[in-house]
Amino acid sequence: MTKYIFILALLASAFSFGQNTLKVIVTDSKSQEYLIGASVQVENSNSSGITDNNGFLELNAIPDGEQNIIFSFIGYENHTVKILFPRTNDEVLKIELIPSEEEELDEVIVQSTRTSRTIKNTPTRIESIDAEELDEKGNMKPANVSMVLHESTGLQVQQTSATSGNASIRVQGLDGRYTQLLKDGYANFGNFASGLSILEIPPLDLQQVEVIKGPASTLYGGGAIAGVINFISKTPKEKGEYNFMFNQSNIGQTNIGGYASQRKGKFGYAILGLVNFQKAYDVDEDDFSEVPKSHNFTINPRIFYYPSESLSLMLGNSFTKTNMEGGDMNVIDGNTTAYHTYFEKNETVRNTTTFELDKKFENLNSFKLKQSLSLFDRTITIPDYEFSGLNTSSFTDASYVFNKEKHTVIAGLNLVYDNFEQRNSGTLDAKSFTTGAYLQHTWDVSEFVKFENGLRIDNVSYSNVVFSKNQTFFLPRISALFKINSNWSSRIGAGLGYKIPTVFTEQTETIQYQNVQPLENVEAEKSIGGTADVNYKHEIFNDLVLSFNQMFFITQINKPLVLQNDGADLAFMNASDPVLSQGFETNLKFVFKEDFKLFMGYTFTDAKAKYLNGNQFLPLLPKNKVNLALIYEKEHNFKMGLEGYFTDEQFLYNGTSTPAFWEFGFMVEKTLWKNFAFFINFENFTDTRQSNYKRVVNDPHNNPTFDDIWTHTEGFTFNGGVKIKF
C-alpha cells in the first residue's frame, strides 16, 4: 500500500512540475483600448482562452520548455511570442496588437463628412461600398451603378419607364427626389438633370461609394431628406493603374471600357473611357421592348497638379452622350405602319466641368474649394409629342477645417444655381439660387464617446413663369458615437431637411411630363428624421467572425408635394398631412477563414402618406425585403458568389397589390497570370419578370398604356467578359 501511495505522489509531483501559468493583457497598439475576446493559444497545445472585459486572460496548464504563444483578434495582425517556461517572474505580460490592413472597411477614410476620418471614428453613420465590391458588381452590370445600389439594404432602384428603362434611387422608402446624389462631393444631379442619372455613372473609375441614410441636409443642403449617396472616384498614385474591361450579354449588350491613372512628380492624370451598345430586347414577344436600343459614350479626363506636398489642384471634365429608343420593335427596326407606331426616344448630353483646390496647413488644418458647372440636355420623343430642355447648374463650396486637440471645426459657404429652360414651349421654365453657410463641430470627448453637431442656414429663391418665392431654412443636426468596448458600438443621429419644389419627379417621368402645369403657390417640403444603430463584431471561434448591425430609422416630411388631377392637366400642391417613413434594417455578416463570406440583410419599411384616404402605403414599396449573398474567394485567384433577394408585395398607384417574389444570381470570376480575369454572371436565373404575372403593355397597340413597373421586365440574363489590370 505504501508503494502505491509513493507512485501516485510521484506522478502528481511530475504532473504539477510540468504545468505553468501565464497572465496577459491584450490592447490595441494605437488606442491602447482593451481588446475583449482576443484569442490566446499555446501552439501545439490544448491551452487556450479569450480575454475578458479588461483584455485580461490567465492561461493554465502550459508545459515546460520554450512555447510559442499566439495572440489573434479580428481586424488585427496575429502576434506570436516565444516564452521559456517556467518563467522567472509572475508579471502580467502586456501585448499590443497592430490593426490589420485587411480590415479595410473600418480604415476607409470617408469624404462625405469633410473630416477625413475613418468610418469607425466618425459619429455620423456612413456605409461604405469599397473598391473590391464595386469591382464585383461591375461584373454584373458594367454600364452603370444600378446593380451596386440594388443589392444594399434600405436602398431601392426603382425603374420608372417600361420602355426606356429609366430608374431612380429610393432610400428608406422615400421618393428618389429626396436622395442627394453626389459625384466626388459635387451636386450635379438635381431637377431635370436627375433624369437617367444612375444609368450614366459607370463603376469602372470608382474607389468607393458612401451612403448616409437619414437626414443630411446640414451637410449638403436641399434634397438630402432621405440621405446622401456619394460616388467617389479613384485618384492617381505613384504606381500607375491601368484597367481594361470587355463584357457581352445574351440580350445584346456590349460594354468596352478602360481606366488609366498615374502620378509623376508634380503632375498626375486619370482618364475613364466607356462605350455601351444595347440592342432592343423583347423577352415576352409582345412586340414591345423590355430593354431599349441604346448607344452610350462616356469620357472623363482629369488633370492633377501638386505644386507642393501641401497643395493640390484638380481640373476635370466628364462628357456623356446617350441615345435610347424603346417601344414597338417594328418601329425600332424602321418598319412603321398604322398598327406599329409607338416608340419612346431619349437623347441626352451631359457635360460636367469640375475644379478643386486643396491646401493643407499645420495641425491637419486645411482649406478646400470645389467648383463645378454642369449642362444636361435631354429630348424625350413619343408619337405626336416631344419634351426637350436644357438644365444648367453651378455648384460652389468653400470650407476650412480647423483641428485642435480633441476638436475639429468645419466652416463653409455654399452656392448652388439651377436653371431649366424648356424648348418650344417654356411652360416649365424654372430656376433657383441657394446661398448657404454651415458650421460643423466634431468633439472626441474620449476614446469611447464622440459627438458631431452642425448648423446650416440656407436662403433659397426659386421661380418659374407664374410665381416666385424666397425661403430661409435653419438646419441643425447632431450625431453621437459610443464605443462601448472593442466589440460593441452605437450611433445615433437626427436633423432637419428640406426639398425645393420641382415638377421633375418619378411620377411625372413616367408620363414624359405631359400636361404637367408649372408650380404655383407651393412651398418647400420640410422634414425631421433620425437614425439609431448598434454594431457588434466578435470572433465566435477560430477563423469564424460575426458582424452584426441593427439600425432604426424614422423620417417625417411635412407639406409633401403631391401631383393632382386638375381637369385635363396635372398640378402639384402641398398636402396638409405628412409622409411618414419608419422601420429598421438588420445586417449579419459571417466570415470564415477570410475565404467564405455570408451576408444576410433584412429591411422593414412602413412608409405612409397620411394625406391619402383608405390605403396610405406609399406605392411601389415593399414592406419586407431580404438580401442574401454567399461568396467564396481566393484572393487574386478565384471568386464565386450566389445571391438571393426576396421582395414583399407592393401597392401600385391604382391601389392594387403585387405578388411577393424571389430573384437569384450567380457569378464566377477566375484570375490568370495576376493581370487577367475572366468572369461570367447569371442574373435572375429563375426568370422572375413582371410579364409572367400580367402584361405590362396594355392595348391599343398603336397607342398603348403601361403598368407600373414593380420587378424585372427583362427576366433571366447572362453575361461574361474579361478584365485586364496592370
Image (cartoon, rainbow, N blue to C red):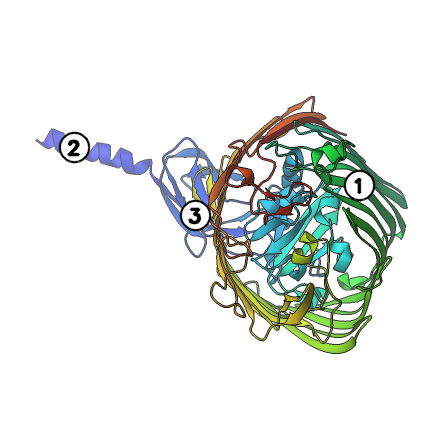
Lateral position of residue 168 relative to residue 490, left or right: right
Which residue is painted at 63% across and 60% down in the image?
227
Coordinates of residue 502 in the picture (x, y in percent): 72, 65
Front-lying residue, 461 or 434: 461
Coordinates of residue 357 in the picture (x, y in percent): 86, 57
Q: Which residue is mark 3?
A: 89
Front-lying residue, 565 or 619: 565
Dot 2 or dot 3: first in sequence order is 2
660, above or below 681, in the image: below
Q: Which residue is mark 2?
A: 6
> Which image quadrant: the C terminus?
top right
Q: Residue 705 bears which disc, if any?
A: none
Q: Residue furthest left?
A: 1
Which residue is painted at 61% across and 55% down in the image?
170
Amino acid type, callout 2: Phe
Where, by quadrant of the figure, is residue 182 drawn? Answer: bottom right
Front-lying residue, 642 or 407: 642
Amino acid type, callout 3: Asn
Callout 1 environment at 10 Å: few (<14), some (14 to 19), or many (20+)?
A: some
Where, by quadrant of the figure, is residue 187 drawn? Answer: bottom right
Secondary element under disc 3, as helix, strand or loop, is loop
Callout 3 environment at 10 Å: few (<14), some (14 to 19), or many (20+)?
A: few
Q: Residue furthest front?
A: 338
Which residue is painted at 74% across and 77% down in the image?
471
Dot 1 or dot 3: first in sequence order is 3
